Image (cartoon, rainbow, N blue to C red):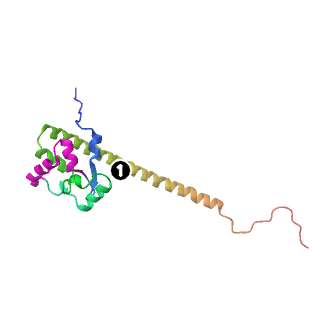
Amino acid sequence: MAKKANSIIPIERIQQGIYLIRNQKVMLDRDLADLYGVKSIALRQQVKRNIGRFPPDFMYQLTDEEVSVLLSQNVIPSRRSLGGHNPYAFTEQGVAMLSSVLRSKRAVEVNIAIMRTFVKLRRILADNALLRKKIESMEKKYDEQFQQVFTILQLMVRQETKPKKPFGFHKKKG
């Protein structure tokens, strides 16, 4: 019998920590540290010790403007909560690389849960894209069919240009 895969962290909790920044789905260092059960500073120190494993497409530091946006959206409670630096954002590949830097059993389990969440989100987005394409195809098909109906209706209501014969009894002149 296959063993049911249970996550130590609910998928909803992970999904709440995934943000769209610079057109990428990322997780912030503070949220990852919370999931891994370590302090943010400890996570950042491990990353800095292994900085060669985190190229810019795996991890980047947020700008002041990006932090302001996150503050306005209540993603970050206050600038003071950042500990004097702008947070780092980790892409899916960056999160995966964290498993090679953070070696605890919990870190491995959390990484598995996070990777499954990213995969689930990709599937949802792919399904939505497919649904959108189907709807657009249907709209195009029905637009063409309705256009034919509208053309016929226009022909039916178009008035004749030649004058109609008078209706009823008329007295002849003369």
* Residue that extends furthest to the front in the rendered view of this protein: 80
Most common SS among magenta residues: helix
Residue in the image at 57% along x and 55% along y: 149
Horizontally, residue 127 falls left or right of residue 96, namely right
| Quarter of the image where one finds residue 116 | top left
Which residue lies at the image location 49% right of the left edge and 53% below the top edge? 142
Residue 57 in sight in this render: no
Q: Residue 107 location, x and y as percent?
A: 15, 41
In x, y percent, where is residue 120? Answer: 28, 43
Q: Amino acid at mark 1?
A: Ala
| Residue topped by disc 1 | 129
Name the residue furthest right: 174
Circle 1 residues within 10 Å: few <14, some 14–19, many ≥20? few
The quarter in which the C terminus is drawn is bottom right
What are the residue bounds of the magenta stretch? Answer: 26-53
User: Residue farthest to the left?
Assistant: 49
Q: Secondary structure at mark 1?
A: helix
Q: Nearer the viewer, residue 2 or 6?
A: 6
Q: Is residue 44 visible?
A: yes
Q: Position of residue 151 (x, y in %)?
A: 57, 60
Q: Is residue 14 magenta?
A: no
Does residue 31 lie above or below 4 as drawn? below
Q: Residue at x 69, y 68 (%)?
A: 161
Q: Give the farthest residue toward the top.
A: 1
Of residues 95 and 157, the one nearer the viewer is 95
Quarter occupied by residue 123: top left
The location of residue 86, given as percent across then percent down, is: 20, 57
